[in-house]
Image (cartoon, grey):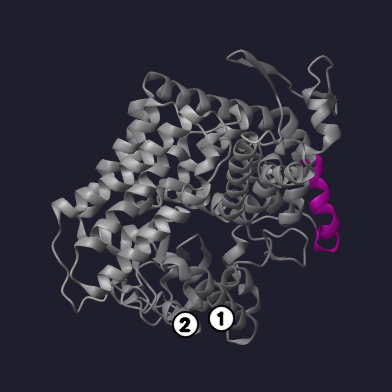
Amino acid sequence: MDKRRVAETILNLVGGADNVKEVTHCFTRLRFVLKDERIPKDEEVSRTEGVISVVRAGGQYQVVCGTKVQGIYQELEDILKEKSSGGGAPPGAAPTSSPGATPAPTSGASSAPTSGASSAPTSGASSAPTSSASPTPTPGATHTSPRRPIGDLILQKVAEIFTPLIPAIAASGLIKGLLTAARLLLERYGIDLAATDTYVILNAASQVIFYFMPIFLAMTCAKAFRCNRVMAMVVGASLVYPQMDALIQNTEQATTIFGLPVLKNAWQIGSSVKVFSYTESVIPIILAILCMAVLERWLTRVIPEIVRLIAVPGLELLVILPLTLVVLGPVGIYVGNGIQYLYDTMMGFSTVLGGALMGGLWGVCVIFGAHRALLPIGLNDVAVNGRQNLLAFAGAANFAQGGAALGVCLKTGNRELRQIAASAALTASVVGVTEPAIYGCNLRLKKPMVCAVICGAVGGAVMGSGNVYGDAFANNGVLTVFTYAAYGMTRFAFYLAGIGAAFFGAAALTYLVGFEELPASDRGQNGE
């Protein structure tokens, strides 16, 4: 497959570079934010080589490409940069056509160009679509597109914030799981692996993404909210700086900034006391960078260009850091605690029911991209309690999708569909990436999707009955199963029973229930 040609075809079908506000990618999808979503014809895009399916969700036009997505995205990014630098797009359009670039670097305040327009991230390209948006019935009518619902906008921003972190989180979970497996195995032979330098170093590497979460989130938030990424990371780093962290956790001594009180606190969680801290926190930095983006746009508009390079970043830090320590940070901590309380209350009512709901509905959420909105709950759980069960239950859904795909592979007489299903079953069960299974066969055939939902709920209920927890936030697959062995072999046995019920149950149920066979001519757009 020529990935360059596939990228060019997809870009042309979505309306060209002038119709693209932004494009990112996750494990399996290209995620476009388009100026005019009426231009792409879903059926034409779906027929493109390498494309599995098309999803419109969360304010994004999502092109599902499976495991080939990263290579296609890299080619697409190169094409957009080429068009931006010399292919007809105006110079101000660089932030629109090159999503990886920091907007308006010349000013030091990346959210707005020198014109001072508050909507500056796309202003440079606002007049350009008329040249290449020929497929649309009303050329140049970018500004007439209906306003995106607030719910879609929130889901889009959540996806933009958390999706770039998932590979690092998955890698951390994999290392954590392997370390747990090795430690448990060597303990049987009287070897204390945890005392070795190798264990200490690798364990530290697996914790970095969580401990310094405010810094990583500051970077992705700055990109999502269109503000200066480096200054955002400075704000995030200030919250986890060792001296600052010690100051925040010292609840015996009052601290002020500009005479304003820095809020500190400690609260009881079970038999332990949790001290107010911004390390591993999620919500405080999101609120801080959101406010920083608003402030940056205003400062860029009112400060003369000659001093903007220094004045805007300096004033941002002088305003946002005190505001975060006095107001936004505490609000974010308590909002996070409130979310955690609601989640714990639901699980306290019935972990079996909670596990069944998550295990059954997670795959449905994936279809609409809504599962990204649940990720902060799991990350917040790790920050507050040092453990999580959200992705354990999601693991039941992942294995159920893989099992249903295996059932399709064993049942179908369509050679192309059998190849798709076999590959999808392997991807879902080994690395926990389910989109190829969902869009490649289960959702298209309908009945396998229903079987996967049912067996995912059963697997989640089994895990819930065993009160399963993991000590890391890891994408669920065979490679990360030992993440759930950290809290004892009994819980681990329930986890294994849950994924077994989900995987083998979905495979057997799909095989028994059957499905309407696809004609041999239906190649399934698997990219072959």
Q: Is residue 7 magenta?
A: no
**Residue receiving disc 1:** 79
Give whichever of discs 2 and 1 has the lower sequence position: 2
| Labels 2 & 1 near each other (Cβ < 8 A) | yes
Mark 1 residue element: helix
Give the percent coordinates (x, y) of residue 272.
Answer: 64, 16
Q: Quadrant of the N terminus?
A: bottom left
Most frequent secondary structure within the magenta stretch:
helix
Residue type of the residue flagged with mark 2? Glu
Mark 2 residue element: helix
Residue type of the residue flagged with mark 1? Ile
Name the residue at 53% across, 41% down. Answer: 482
Judge by depth and name the residue closer to the eye, 489 or 240. Answer: 489
Quick one: label 2, few (<14), some, or many (20+) residues within 10 Å? Answer: some
Name the residue at 64% across, 34% down. Answer: 187
Total number of numbered discs in the rendering? 2
Above or below 105: residue 153: above
**Residue receiving disc 2:** 8
Name the residue at 33% across, 27% down. Answer: 353
Judge by depth and name the residue closer to the eye, 199 or 34. Answer: 199
Splitting the image into 4 quarters, where does residue 259 fall?
A: top right
Name the residue at 47% across, 73% down. Answer: 19
Which region of the structure is painted magenta? Answer: 304-319
- The answer to whether any part of residue 444 appears in the image is no
Residue 390 in the figure: left or right of residue 452: right
Give the percent coordinates (x, y) of residue 67.
Answer: 46, 67
Above or below 60: residue 1: below
Give the percent coordinates (x, y) of residue 338.
Answer: 53, 24
Judge by depth and name the residue closer to the eye, 468 or 62. Answer: 468
